[in-house]
Image (cartoon, rainbow, N blue to C red):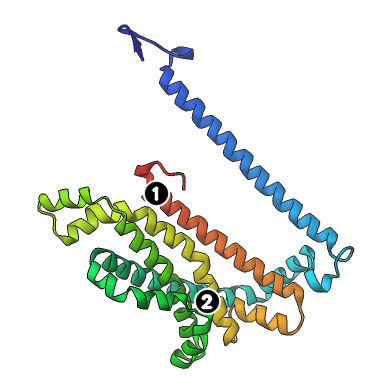
């Protein structure tokens, strides 16, 4: 920078501002690295305590052990059960997530932009939202059968409400000064949606999508619990009926890892979409 017309440099003749930014970035990189190390250490501590407690403090029948769970996962991976059943669950989850998100976004935008529609349908939406979604599973089985369609429907319904409510709140939260300014400049409804409303409500919508990922997986698995002969939910239900604790925990590990990976992908999408806001995701 300049002081009284004189250029001020940092160490090595480099600009002081640039050097400060570099030091800040290095500090952030070290901090993130420390967090990753701590995450690994916490995971090691949890699994170590689990392994030590199994058979000494608690009967393995109730909690199995990390070694037994890893062995079961290896067996499923080798004989093809892991890929076969996981692909079915992911298929239902992805379709449910996609359908629920699209319908939830469209209806959330519609309700937020047109107050008359929101006022008329608000008590019905609230009533439907209050229904425990698992109570709809028997109805979906009667409507769509015991195939993959009922699992997709269960997943889509759960995702719909999360995305709908976040989209509705996000669109309603848009600064009306921006909307009125765009209208004065001749913007139509489509241009308002693309230029003003969508960027302003993006954080709300992406939060709804991020929260919906594990619930989409839950919907698919719940559907498999109710009626299925394949999928991770089926493996867990079958293992539970046979009192096979290791297989139950193996299925839970698969679901946890899958949900974590999907959430990490969506976080990257969120950071890219909201990079103009400087968000860390």
Q: Which residue is mark 2?
A: 220
Which residue is at the front of the view, 83 or 136?
A: 136
Give how far apart the Cα atoms at labels 2 and 1 are. 28 Å
In the image: residue 45, left or right of residue 182: right
In the image: residue 31, left or right of residue 148: right
Q: Which part of the image, by quadrant, shows the N terminus?
A: top left
As drawn, the label of residue 201 is none
Residue 71 figure quarter:
bottom right
Residue 230 visible, this orientation: no
Q: Residue at x 65, y 69 (%)?
A: 252
Which residue is at the front of the view, 130 or 12?
A: 130
Residue 158, percent from left and from top: 46, 73
Compare marks 2 and 1 and give the one earlier in the sequence. Answer: 2
Q: Is residue 14 above or below residue 233?
A: above
Q: Nearer the viewer, mark 2 or mark 1?
A: 2
Which residue is at the front of the view, 75 or 250?
A: 250
Q: Residue at x 50, y 81 (%)?
A: 151
Q: Is residue 50 above or below residue 75?
A: above
Q: Which residue is mark 1?
A: 272
Which SS class for mark 2?
helix
Q: Residue at x 46, y 79 (%)?
A: 152
Residue 237, percent from left and from top: 66, 81
Badge 1 crowding class, 10 Å Cα cut-off, few under 14, some 14 to 19, many 20 or more, is some
């Amino acid at each position: 920078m300049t002081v009284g017309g004189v250029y001020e440099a940092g160490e090595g003749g480099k600009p002081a501002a640039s050097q400060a930014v570099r030091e800040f970035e290095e500090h952030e990189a070290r901090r993130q690295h420390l967090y990753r190390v701590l995450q690994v250490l916490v995971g090691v501590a949890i699994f170590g305590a689990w392994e030590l407690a199994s058979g000494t403090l608690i009967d393995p029948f109730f909690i199995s052990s990390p070694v037994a769970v890893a062995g079961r996962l290896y067996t499923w991976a080798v004989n093809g059960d892991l890929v076969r059943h996981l692909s079915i669950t992911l298929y239902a989850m992805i379709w449910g997530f996609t359908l629920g998100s699209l319908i939830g976004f469209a209806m959330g935008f519609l309700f937020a932009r047109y107050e008359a529609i929101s006022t008329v349908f608000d008590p019905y939406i609230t009533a439907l939202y209050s229904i425990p979604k698992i109570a709809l599973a028997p109805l979906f089985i009667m409507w769509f059968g015991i195939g993959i369609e009922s699992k997709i429907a269960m997943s889509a319904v759960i995702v719909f409400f999360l995305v709908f409510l976040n989209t509705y709140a996000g669109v309603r939260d848009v600064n009306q000064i921006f909307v009125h300014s765009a209208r004065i400049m001749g913007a139509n409804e489509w241009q308002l949606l693309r230029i003003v409303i969508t960027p302003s409500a993006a954080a709300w919508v992406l939060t709804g999508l991020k929260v919906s990922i594990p619930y989409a997986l839950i919907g698919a698995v719940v559907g498999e619990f109710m009626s299925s002969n394949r999928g991770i939910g089926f493996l867990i239900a079958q293992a539970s009926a046979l009192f096979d604790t290791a297989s139950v925990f193996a299925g839970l590990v698969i679901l946890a890892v899958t949900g974590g990976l999907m959430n990490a992908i969506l976080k990257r999408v969120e950071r890219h979409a909201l990079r103009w806001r400087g968000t860390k995701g």
